[in-house]
Image (spheres, rainbow, N blue to C red):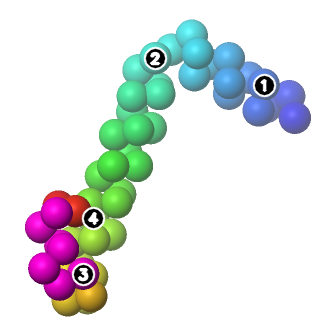
């Protein structure tokens, strides 16, 4: 529990960590939906995501 409190404090005092995490999540979503299988599954909606 103490580690979670420390993590929360660090995220508040260092906004670049928060921006980095958000950027990483967005890039992860784009990478996940860019595979050939996901492109086929999403069909015409693939370009909307990417």
Query: Which of the labelled discs sits on residue 31, or is there none?
Result: 4
For the residues labelled 2 and 4, the Cα–Cα distance comes to: 24 Å
Q: Nearer the viewer, mark 3 or mark 1?
A: 3
Residue 32 figure quarter: bottom left
* Left/right of residue 8 with respect to residue 13 in the rendered view: right
**Circle 2 SS class:** helix
* Left/right of residue 40 with respect to residue 1 in the rendered view: left
**Circle 4 SS class:** helix
* Left/right of residue 23 with respect to residue 6 in the rendered view: left
Quickly name the residue at label 3: 42
Q: Residue at x 68, y 24 (%)?
A: 8
Q: Residue at x 41, y 38 (%)?
A: 22
Q: Residue at x 57, y 22 (%)?
A: 11
Quickly name the residue at label 2: 15
Query: Which of the labelled discs sits on residue 5, or is there none?
Result: 1
- The region drawn magenta spans 42-48
Q: Residues within 10 Å of mark 3 (few under 14, many from 20)?
A: some
Q: Residues within 10 Å of mark 4 (few under 14, many from 20)?
A: few
Number of numbered discs on residues: 4
Location of residue 12 in the rendering, given as x and y in whole percent from the top left corner: 58, 15
Res. 7 visible in picture: yes
């Amino acid at each position: 529990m103490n580690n979670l409190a420390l993590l929360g404090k660090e995220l508040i005092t260092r906004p670049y960590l928060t921006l980095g995490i958000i950027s990483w999540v967005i890039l992860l979503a784009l990478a996940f939906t860019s595979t050939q299988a996901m492109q086929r599954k999403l069909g015409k909606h693939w370009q909307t995501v990417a």
